[in-house]
Structures are given as structure tokens and as C-alpha cells.
Amino acid sequence: MKTVYFDNSATTKTDEEVVKAMLPYITENYGNASSIYKIGRDNRKAVEEAREKVAKVLGCEPTEIYFTAGGSESDNTAIKGIAHSYRQKGNHIITSKIEHPAVLETCKQLEKEGFEISYISVDENGIINLEELKKAIKPTTILISVMFANNEIGNIEPIKEIGEIAKEHQIIFHTDAVQAIGNININVKELGIDSLSLSAHKFYGPKGVGALYVKKGVKFDKLIDGGHQEMNKRAGTENVAGIVGLGKAIELAYENLEEHNKKIKELRDYYVEQVKQKIPYIKINGDMEKRLPGNSNISFRFIEGEGLLLNLDLKGICASSGSACTSGSLDPSHVLLAIGLPHEIAHGSLRISIGKYNTKEEVDYLIESLVEIVNRLREMSPLWEEFIEKESNK
Amino acid sequence: MEYSEKVVDHYTNPRNVGKIEDASGVGEVGNPVCGDIMKMFIKVENNIITDVKFKTFGCGAAIATSSISTEMIKGKTLEEALALKNTDVVNMLGGLPPVKLHCSVLAEEAIHEAIADYYRKEGKLTEEEIKEKCNLKEHHCNACEGH
């Protein structure tokens, strides 16, 4: 059976051009980038070229880019590193309720160390409440960390405004841009971002490699002690092939940004329109304007998300859900609860994230499959039965 | 998380889905906050469950446990059906992931509630006797705590 992949927010298929760029660094160029001989020096050069590519996209200096093992490490390094480094100045950090666990769990860890964290609420579309954020600022606030775009509902936060607020109060501003990079033009200087996390596998690069931007002058303690790699800020022999892959992937993503976004957005809008027309009693979650081009998140009332995913999987379709059953915990997604969805509607959510390799035929197949599965699961649902009975008695 | 072949078979082709219009007993357990609701309909003739149907809102494991437990009690006496334990359902399914074990408890409880409903309609036993015979418990679901 053919795999039809609609989970591009989870990860993406590595671009063949990226694989091609990486291959020599797995095979003949195996040297350690810190070594003095040629195959070492060649690797150092490859790493620095990748750093320049990332810096060019973000509009910063290459010396402000640190390679890591991915988005989670970048978030941990930025938040813990900055918090520990500025502990003398204060112990208060501001973040949002809908951050990725890489940020939320890091903040919880800091709470155990005596830091105070304010979790700012969001509106029904996931957009952060800026007034609440301003009011949360104290003399002890050292860091604001708000994600660029949300991984579940795709909404884009008012990053520039947050950057201005942070600057006005001389607070460091970090953003988890893992979902945004490769989808949105981001200039860290123009947006007032002091630190930014990104991960290669979200934009057709390899897994296990990411980067952290930290503005010159912003101090942060290192997370991993050891050698002097990454300007003495991240020990460990460089993952040269991964770093080269990240560089190539970010370059490709921004070379073709408008073209890809246009196609992806058209497919996403077509999908949402078709679902609206063909399936009643749905709720579209997230902001329709300030949103990542490929993201859609729809709740199908009266059914549960895991059942939906399992049935899609039987048809070769890959997607994800905010249902408790798929989160590994007993509660549905914290993001869907934060935007005010009742539990039973959050349980029935389906995230479809469209990428550059998806086609209209695939979207048609998805819609056809969804109509059939949703109908079948509703026929099986006691909630649907009750609802229909109530409707017919009206 | 890996489901057994039997679980996949039952959520793919659930048996006995639907409702019985003139059911002898109906039992409903779970709640939408948790993401699981099971409703079981039984038809009883001469102390034997002659027909059983279910409707379930829930994950793959919830659908599979509902489906297989209907098969396990059909044709059985009420006493035999009441003796069915959630662990029997789990074994019959070839196991369930630990986080899904509560689904099998729901299936057991749905059967007990449906039989209790039958006894109530029949009117021969007192509520106390029904509670004891059907081993009715206040439903305690960790997932619901705090909601």
C-alpha cells in the first residue's frame, strides 16, 4: 500500500538534494572537524559554510549560530542557559500556555530550581494575550520565551510585538521557531529576537541536528560540557553530515519559499473547504489568517481521534491528533484545551500538515477516506446517536 | 504503541455494532471528558443473553474491547456474563498496551450495568441485591479525576 504522508509538522521526508549533499560526509570525508589534517580541515570548512547559510537566512552573523542535536536541545540550551546565566539579575521567566513540551518541561524543571514562571494565556485561535504578557513583567523578569508558530494549530504569534515589549523592558526574548523556519521569512534583527531555536528535519533536512541563534552579547551557560566545539558553547564532535544537511535544507527552503508556500496553502485551503462541504458538525481550530501554510486542525464532533488515525493508517494515510489516546497521557492536547475546546471536542481533533511533496490527488484520497471513516465512526458512537435523537425531536 | 492483530481486527471490523430497539437491558459507562463511552444493549430470554449490540465513542482499544466482549457474552447465561472479567477480555484480545487497560474495565462495567438494568426492569430483586449481584461500583477513572 502506498504511504500518503500528511504529517509534515511531525517530520518531513529528507530532500534528495540534501541527502546528496550529506553523503560525502558520511563516506569519504569522515575526518573530525577539529583535526588539523586535510579531511579534518575540509569538514571544518563544510560546517562553517552551513553556519553561514543559516546566518544568511536569519539575518545574523555566523558567530551567532550554534549547532545542536535538534529543536529540543536548542530550547533547553537557550532557556536553561540564559536562566542560569542571568540568575543574579532575576529569577522570573515568561512563556505561553501553548509551547512545545521542549519549552514547557524545561520551564517546569527551572521551577524546581527556584525560578518563577508565568504561563500567559492565548485566545480561542491560539494568539497570545499581549496585555497579560505586559502585566506579567516584573523587575526580576530575565527571559520571555514564546513560540513563533504553534505545532498543533499552526497559528503564528505576534513575534515583532513581543520583541518590542522585551526590548522596551530590556528582557531577553527567545522564540522556538521549529515549526516556522522553512515556512516564514524570519529576520531576527528586524523582529527583535535575541535567541531562536530551529530543527533541520522540519524543513526536509535530516533528523538529529538543529541550531540555536543567540545574539552577540547575550550570555548563556552551556548545557553540554566537554571539548571546545561550537565556540566553546556546545561540546561534542560535530555531526558534520547532519550540519551540512541542515545548511543545504535551509538554503533550499528559502530559495523556493514563495513557490512552495503558494502550492501548499492552496492544497490546505482546498482540503479545509472540501471537509466543510462534505462533513457536517466539525470545528476548525486555530486562526485562519495568521497560520502556517500547510497546517489544518479540525475537530470532528462525536468521534475520538485515535480511532480516526487508526482507520486512516489502514488506508496508508499518516496524520496526527490531539486526542488523549495519542498523547500518551490521559488528557487531550494542552494546546486545544488552552484555546478553550471542551475535552470531548479536543479528543476528536485531526491535524493534517501538508508539505511540498503532497499532491491534489492525495488530498482527494484523504477527503474521500475521511468522509467514509467519520461516517462509520459516528454510526458507532453513542454521542452521535444522542445528538441525532435530540435533533429529530426539535 | 503496538496493538495486537486481534485488536486491529476488532477495531477494523467491529462485531455487533448498533442498538437493540426493544432491549431487555442497556448499560452505559464512561464519559466524554475521558474520551471513552460504551453503551451495551442486551436481549435476555430465559436467563440467556440471546442478542447483544454496542455503541462506543473511543479509541481503537475501546472499540475492540466492546466488540470482543459482545462476542464473549452472546449465548451465555446472565451469571456467566457477570463472571466475565476485564482480564479475560484482555487475554482474548492477545493483550492491550498498559495505558489502554482501562478500556477493558469499561467493557466489564458496561456488561454489568446492562444486566443490572435488566434486573431492574424485571423488578424481582431489590436495588441492594442488584448492586451485589452485578458488583456495581462507583466508577473511578483516573482520567476523570480533577475534571
Image (tube, grey):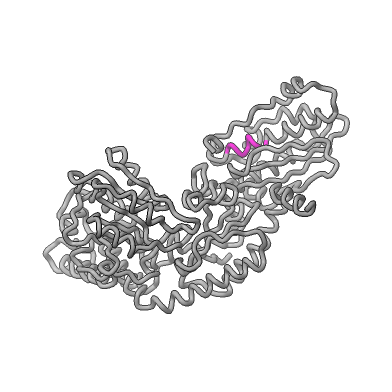
Can the viewer see residue A245?
yes
Q: Is residue A143 left or right of residue B10?
A: left
Q: Position of residue A168 (x, y in %)?
A: 25, 59
Chain part drawn in magenta: B101-107
Q: Is residue B104 magenta?
A: yes
Q: Is residue B91 left or right of residue A207?
A: right
Is A245 above or below relative to A258? above
Dominant secondary structure of the residues highlighted in magenta in the image: helix
Q: Position of residue A375 (x, y in %)?
A: 69, 58
At a point 74% along the width and 36% down the height, the residue shown is B27
> Farthest residue toward the left?
A36
> Farthest residue toward the right?
B46
Can the viewer see residue A239?
no
- Closest to the observer: A372 or A25? A372
- Closest to the observer: A167 or A247? A167
Is A303 above or below relative to A36? above
Q: Position of residue A377 (x, y in %)?
A: 68, 54
At a point 21% along the width and 54% down the height, the residue shown is A234
Q: Is residue A83 magenta?
A: no
